[in-house]
């Protein structure tokens, strides 16, 4: 197998395929993907208004609708003791608030869009090495059905996920690593009562977190995110623990009455959030390969689209220049990536943290809800308002209200505020001076992705 291209994109899911589609419209690229689609990947699959708008621009919204997945507008939230139901905020050009399409359904649509745009998508083709010349990556070594071979390119894009081969082989360093504090288990149900209006349910209270929504093909997906201390119990009796968590969320209990589970429970108990060096001579990382965050806010897919959308023009511009000029264009894009996602990264950590939320957060939501503005929180989840723009201006008022209402708890409220402010300062520092994980310590490895598949068969209906 031999060949050459301007750009090789490694990986054909949320980052790789849209990037390939955008590049192919400019006449540049080839995509290699080790899997053969349709094939599932271990991920839930919510994406928000910005992602839906992007997919519409990509030309695939009709294909998405044909999957049967509703583009939801209604959101039923619980933030500790604050229950708030709102419409997902949308702007001109939006086609819906939030949607959920299983990955073995979504990803082939994305890969087809790349092919339709003119990209050459080579499935069952695994990158096993990088070709280098004088310290510069100049292509990839691949293994496929017809044996091994070399593909040369001016730029190799690693869109190959959080355990990226391109990142490992190019020596991209990880930084600002954060371990997960909750696991994520999910299952699909048929015959669920989804009510008159498709609704996205997001409840986070005390140590619990339950997320549920209609997905494609008439199925209802339920996710529970227990704290890691509960994982042993989940391993012992997944069905009972999952059901206990799911049914403690009222809208989910109502939806599941009379419903039956379809297929196995799926789950993941270990991951790390991180950034990686975004680029180097002849290579750049996109999507999870360069930046993975806690899945609690459901942003990995939308962020992969945002990155592809910004990377494509940067690549086209860079290809018109010398090799150092191309590398500089990738460096600039990497700086954009870091600025664009830093605040949201820490927000994702907070959403996925163990334990109840700090008291000021539900207090801020309560205040917004009282003024009919709680939907502004969802602008954060659509990557349209940075978390600090919602939280910081409202922090003093929320603290004042808490201090007035909970006189006996003033010291603990102030202590919690102190912890939050210190943490915020440290994060700002890390945004400017990243804490790298040295490869020599072995700590760079994300570790095996642990798959929890229950032996419990789906009950007969
Ligand atoms: C438990 C969990 C739940 C999640 N839930 C959500 C959610 O609800 N919403 C959301 O937005 N995000 C969610 N995410 C995040 C989301 O899965 C990712 O952000 C998203 O898949 C990133 O897409 P990607 O294209 O960068 O990488 P991936 O989807 O990982 O795709 C990488 C591709 O590269 C291919 N590849 C890898 N190595 C090679 C190689 N050597 N050669 C060729 N091909 C290769 C792989 O086969 C794969 O197809 C979740 C993640 C987890 C772990």
Image (cartoon, helix red, strand yellow):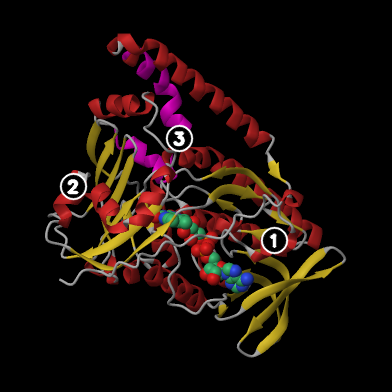
In depth, the one of 193 and 286 nearer the eye is: 193
User: Which residue ends up furthest to the bottom in the rendered image?
Assistant: 146
Residue 84, percent across and down? 23, 36
User: Which residue ends up furthest to the front in the rendered image?
Assistant: 236
Residue 42, percent across and down? 44, 63
Mark 1 and mark 2 in contact? Answer it, CB < 8 Å. no
Query: Few, some or many C-alpha atoms within 10 Å of disc 3 (few <14, some 14-19, many ≥20)?
Result: many
Residue at (39, 68) in percent of width and height: 106
Residue 392 among magenta residues? yes
In depth, the one of 34 and 372 nearer the eye is: 34
Mark 2 and mark 3 in contact? Answer it, CB < 8 Å. no
- Report the residue marked by disc 2: 251
**What segment is highlighted magenta in the picture?**
374-401
Query: Few, some or many C-alpha atoms within 10 Å of disc 1 (few <14, some 14-19, many ≥20)?
Result: some
| Quarter of the image that includes the N terminus | bottom right
In terms of secondary structure, where does tag 3 sit?
helix
Can you tell which mark lies on residue 168? Answer: 1
Q: Main secondary structure of the magenta part?
A: helix
Residue 414, percent across and down? 44, 14
Q: Earlier in the sequence, mark 1 or mark 2?
A: 1
Query: Few, some or many C-alpha atoms within 10 Å of disc 2 (few <14, some 14-19, many ≥20)?
Result: many
Tell me which corner region of the image, top left, top right, bottom left or bottom right, holds residue 54.
bottom left
Residue 78 among magenta residues? no
Can you tell which mark lies on residue 387? Answer: 3
């Amino acid at each position: 197998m031999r060949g050459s291209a301007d750009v090789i994109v490694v990986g054909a899911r949320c980052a790789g395929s849209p990037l390939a589609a955008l590049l192919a419209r400019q006449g540049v690229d080839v995509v290699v993907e080790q899997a053969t689609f349709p094939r599932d990947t271990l991920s839930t699959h919510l994406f928000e208004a910005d992602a839906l708008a992007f997919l519409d621009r990509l030309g695939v919204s009709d294909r998405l609708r044909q999957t049967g997945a509703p583009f939801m507008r209604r959101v039923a939230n619980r933030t500790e003791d604050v229950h708030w139901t709102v419409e997902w905020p949308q702007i001109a050009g939006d086609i819906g608030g939030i949607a959920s399409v299983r990955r073995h359904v979504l990803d082939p649509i994305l890969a087809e869009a790349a092919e339709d745009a003119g990209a050459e998508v080579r499935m069952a083709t695994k990158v096993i090495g990088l070709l280098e010349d004088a310290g510069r990556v100049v292509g990839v070594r691949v293994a496929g059905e017809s044996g091994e071979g070399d593909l040369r390119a001016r730029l190799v894009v690693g869109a190959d996920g959080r355990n990226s081969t391109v990142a490992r082989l190019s020596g991209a360093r990880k930084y600002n690593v954060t371990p997960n504090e909750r696991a994520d288990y999910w299952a699909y149900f048929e015959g669920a009562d989804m009510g008159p209006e498709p609704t996205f349910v997001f409840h986070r209270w005390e140590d619990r977190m339950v997320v549920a929504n209609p997905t494609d093909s008439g199925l209802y997906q339920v996710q529970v995110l227990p704290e890691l201390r509960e994982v042993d119990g989940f391993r012992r009796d997944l069905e009972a623990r999952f059901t206990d968590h799911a049914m403690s969320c009222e809208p989910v209990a109502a939806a599941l009455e009379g419903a039956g589970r379809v297929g196995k429970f799926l789950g993941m108990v270990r991951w790390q959030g991180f950034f990686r060096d975004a680029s180097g001579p002849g290579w750049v990382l996109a999507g999870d390969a360069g930046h993975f965050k806690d899945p609690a806010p459901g942003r990995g897919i939308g962020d992969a689209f945002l990155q592809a959308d910004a990377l494509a023009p940067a690549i086209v511009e860079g290809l018109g220049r010398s090799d150092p000029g191309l590398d500089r264009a990738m460096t600039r894009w990497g700086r954009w990536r870091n600025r664009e996602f830093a605040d949201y990264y820490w927000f994702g950590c907070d959403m996925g943290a163990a334990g109840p939320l700090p008291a000021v957060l539900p207090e801020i939501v309560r205040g917004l809800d009282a003024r009919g503005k709680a939907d502004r929180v969802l602008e954060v989840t659509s990557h349209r308002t940075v978390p600090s723009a919602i939280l910081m201006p409202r922090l003093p008022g929320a603290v004042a209200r808490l201090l007035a209402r909970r006189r006996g708890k003033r010291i603990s409220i102030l202590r919690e505020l102190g912890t939050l402010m210190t943490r915020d300062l440290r994060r700002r520092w890390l945004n400017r001076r990243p804490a790298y994980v040295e490869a020599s310590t072995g700590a760079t490895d994300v570790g095996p992705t642990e798959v929890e598949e229950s032996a419990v068969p789906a009950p007969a209906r």
